[in-house]
Image (cartoon, helix red, strand yellow):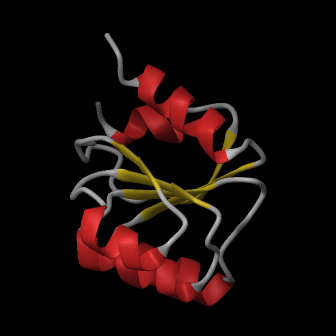
Amino acid sequence: MKLQNILELPECRVLVKGNPDREISRVFCCDLLSIAMGKAPADGVWVTVMGNKNTLAVASLTDTACIVMAEGVSLDEGTLEKAAEEGIAVLSTELPVFDIALEIYEAGRP
């Protein structure tokens, strides 16, 4: 699956586009930054409600392709600008973590 598939999900608002052609490895859900730091997959989509600059730092460290902020959470403008510089896509949705993770997973199924 490509990031473009996720950018087109109607339930998500694109805050930072990232590289639409980037391959996605899998979906990862976690709200503890220390666990995400050790377990988030490279090229993954990270679904979380942790809306702070440390979320972006962990995403950068783990080579996450996309952060999806669930439950209507967002990142501040400065953090979004840094995400754009680093090529990390950021989306926001009102859906709960599980619901959007399932939609992302199903978007990648043949």
Quadrant of the image occupied by residue 63: bottom left
Quadrant of the image occupied by residue 50: bottom right
* In this picture, residue 91 sits left or right of residue 93: left
* In this picture, residue 51 sits left or right of residue 58: right
Residue furthest top as drawn: 110
What residue is rendered at 31% in x and 77% in y? 60
Residue 59, can we see it?
A: no
Q: Quadrant of the C terminus?
A: top left
What residue is rendered at 31% in x and 61% in y? 40
* In this picture, residue 24 sits left or right of residue 72: left
Residue 100 percent coordinates (x, y)? 61, 37
What residue is rendered at 60% in x and 39% in y? 98
Residue 16 percent coordinates (x, y)? 53, 63
What residue is rendered at 60% in x and 89% in y? 78
Instruction: Say if 80 sits above or below 66 in the image.
Output: below
Q: Nearer the viewer, residue 16 or 105?
A: 105
Instruction: Say if 87 sits above or below 95 in the image.
Output: below
Residue 58 percent coordinates (x, y)? 37, 78
Instruction: Say if 62 sits above or below 23 in the image.
Output: below
Quadrant of the image occupied by residue 85: bottom left
